[in-house]
Image (spheres, grey):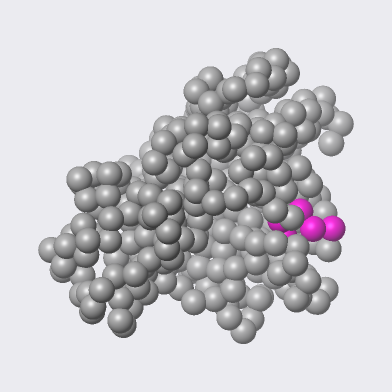
Amino acid sequence: MTATEHRGLDLGNLHSYLIHSGVSVDGELRADLISGGKSNLTYTISDDTSRWVLRRPPTAGLTPSAHDVAREYRITSALQGTGVPVARTITLCQDVSVLGAPFTLVEHVSGRVIRTKTELTELDGQDIDACIDELVHVLGTLHNVDYHAVGLGEFGRPDGYVTRQVALWAKQWSRVNTEGHPDLDRLHAGLAESIPAQSEASIVHGDFRIDNTILAPDDVSRVAAVVDWELSALGDPLTDVALMCVYRNPAFDLVIGEPAAWTSSRLPSADEIAQRYTLASGRELSHWNFYLALANFKLAVIAEGINHRYRVGATVGDGFDKAGESVPEFIAAGLRALKGKI
């Protein structure tokens, strides 16, 4: 790993911390960069016998709440044994003297991650169909977890979740906006004026799509683990479903920085994925256009956040330079949804 890729990771400090925390370490620690800063910095950490995954926030350009590793650690710890596939949690370190920021360590899950259209070509139509069914089933299973029963009753305030989301992402925008985009204000105003009553609360993942799962090595119709829980919360399950569908927009390739598997025309349409979720979960998609508009609003802000971090030099790796170009696309799609034209 190069010095640049080591940004935010001190293996000597990490080794000492793990030993003092009672984690068995066999030999020298090694690290490989998995993700360089579109969300959290993510590394595979290994010694002579074990493999783990470490996640920590980017080193600069943070948007508050969007890189909360303690949040994802707490929720994945609670989901152990619920039927929602997650990695076994190892430790949460909130002592910033170790790596300069909080971080989590979880057990490495072996499997297959399908991120790009090229990787998707290895699957035939039947495999893709079975995989989509499994993904919507897992999301429905998550939304049906009794969050009180798993110890998450005090995790957050599910009531008023959508109202707070509209305000939160508007505030995030004010922190990362570099290009203006006056139509974003129109979209925000339209959302604020049309917030529906929340009829249900559940655990929400906040970033659910195929590449935020690890599929079983020999069976793409089985999810071995759902990952990237940094935006998880107690809230409205339809926000998860809408965002999953909005990720199907081809403009999402600009956010990812490569031809994303989830935007492929070989996958079912966003409408069909939404219908499959309804069948798998038993939930109706009430006020659906509002939720699609909100998802586009959120994704526009996320894309601008990536653009902001790229501009201040806080990203590691390639593929960050085009994210800002997607922002107008998502704003326009959100406005169309509010007008009922989607």
User: At which x and y percent is residue 245?
Assistant: 72, 48
Residue 51 appears in the rendering:
yes
User: At which x and y percent is residue 304?
Assistant: 61, 32
Residue drawn where x is 57% and y is 63% of the image: 213
User: At which x and y percent is residue 200?
Assistant: 55, 42
Q: Is residue 284 magenta?
A: no
Residue drawn where x is 36% and y is 43% of the image: 155
Q: Is residue 36 above or below residue 23?
A: above
Residue drawn where x is 81% and y is 50% of the image: 271
Q: Quadrant of residue 342?
A: top right
Residue 284 appears in the rendering:
no
* Residue 188 left/right relative to 145: right
* Residue 144 left/right relative to 333: left
Q: How many marks?
A: 0
Residue drawn where x is 54% and y is 46% of the image: 38
Q: Is residue 261 magenta?
A: yes
Read off the magenta span: 260-265
**Quarter of the image that includes the N terminus:** bottom left
User: At which x and y percent is residue 298?
Assistant: 61, 34
Q: Is residue 148 above or below residue 115?
A: above
Q: Is residue 2 above or below residue 237?
A: below
Q: Is residue 299 above or below residue 274?
A: above
Residue at the extreme left: 20
Along the viewing direction, whichever of 329 and 97 lies nearer the viewer: 97
* Residue 261 left/right relative to 69: right
